[in-house]
Image (tube, coloured by chain):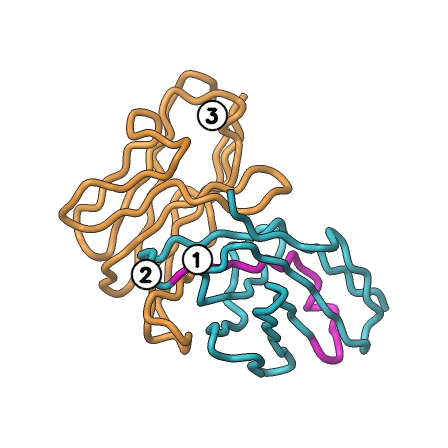
Amino acid sequence: GESVGLHLPTLSVQEGDNSIINCAYSNSASDYFIWYKQESGKGPQFIIDIRSNMDKRQGQRVTVLLNKTVKHLSLQIAATQPGDSAVYFCAETPTDSWGKLQFGAGTQVVVTP
Amino acid sequence: SAVISQKPSRDICQRGTSLTIQCQVDSQVTMMFWYRQQPGQSLTLIATANQGSEATYESGFVIDKFPISRPNLTFSTLTVSNMSPEDSSIYLCSVEDFTSGGLWDETQYFGPGTRLLVL
């Protein structure tokens, strides 16, 4: 079946550096994408989202890029901080699917001092 | 944005027993969702729960194992029945919340989860 997956299971980043988390998706019908952050012992927290008619969207210290040609999604975190240590999930859905999100495998980001 | 709470936050249960997990939202929402997150893994949708109708289950999940109630627009329960160690997971509810700044009215926001260990 079609799926969403991540390239790297673990990403180690030095504090202050920029982080890039990648995600590949295969459902060409997906037109909405979300990044979630899950800290240990907590539920996933919404970070940022993007629609398929956009290439880029910026938030506070985060940027999401969407490349529909190669079905690739990335999350960039600027000036990574210790509080950014978490598992990051991408999720995708066709917006006519009544909210059925499909999640990628997750990337563990570890911020080192 | 909506505040979502779950009870219990964690539990340890014996195999063969059942556990009912509650999800409470501080505002009325149309759609609520239940997910399972097995240890070290991603989230898998169990079912969608709409008020006034039967829950819609995803492939691999059945009502006899995971009965769901949705008595009103702010509350839902998920029961994990006849538990086995394979049911040890985090169970998460989510709701759509169009007030929280997402680009889509049905963007989902998650509760803190219920951590279940079955012995």
Q: Secondary structure at mark 1?
A: strand
Identify residue type, mark 1.
Answer: Phe
Badge 2 and badge 3 in a common chain: no
Badge 2 and badge 1 in a common chain: no
Up the image or down, A107 lies above or below B45; here it is below
Residue B65, given in percent of the width and then of the height, sits at 35, 26
Q: Classify residue B97 by image quadrant.
A: bottom left
The residue under label 2 is: A96
Which of these two is toward me, A66 or B33? A66
| Disc 1 chain ID | B
Q: Secondary structure at mark 3?
A: strand
Badge 3 and badge 1 in a common chain: yes
Residue A45, given in percent of the width and then of the height, sits at 52, 63
Q: Compute the Cα span from label 2 to label 3.
A: 38 Å
Q: Residue at x 59, y 72 (%)?
A: A66
| Disc 3 chain ID | B
Q: Residue at x 34, y 42 (%)?
A: B47
Tell me the number on the disc at residue B13. Answer: 3
Q: Is residue A79 magenta?
A: yes
Residue furthest left in the image: B52
Within 10 Å of disc 1 (Cα), the crowding (few <14, some 14-19, many 20+) is: many
Q: Which residues are magenta?
A: A77-94
Q: Are marks 3 and 1 in contact (CB under 8 Å)?
A: no
Within 10 Å of disc 3 (Cα), the crowding (few <14, some 14-19, many 20+) is: some
Identify residue type, mark 2.
Answer: Asp
Q: Compute the Cα span from label 3 to label 1.
A: 24 Å
Q: Classify residue A62 by image quadrant.
A: bottom right
The residue under label 1 is: B110
Residue A59, given in percent of the width and then of the height, sits at 57, 82
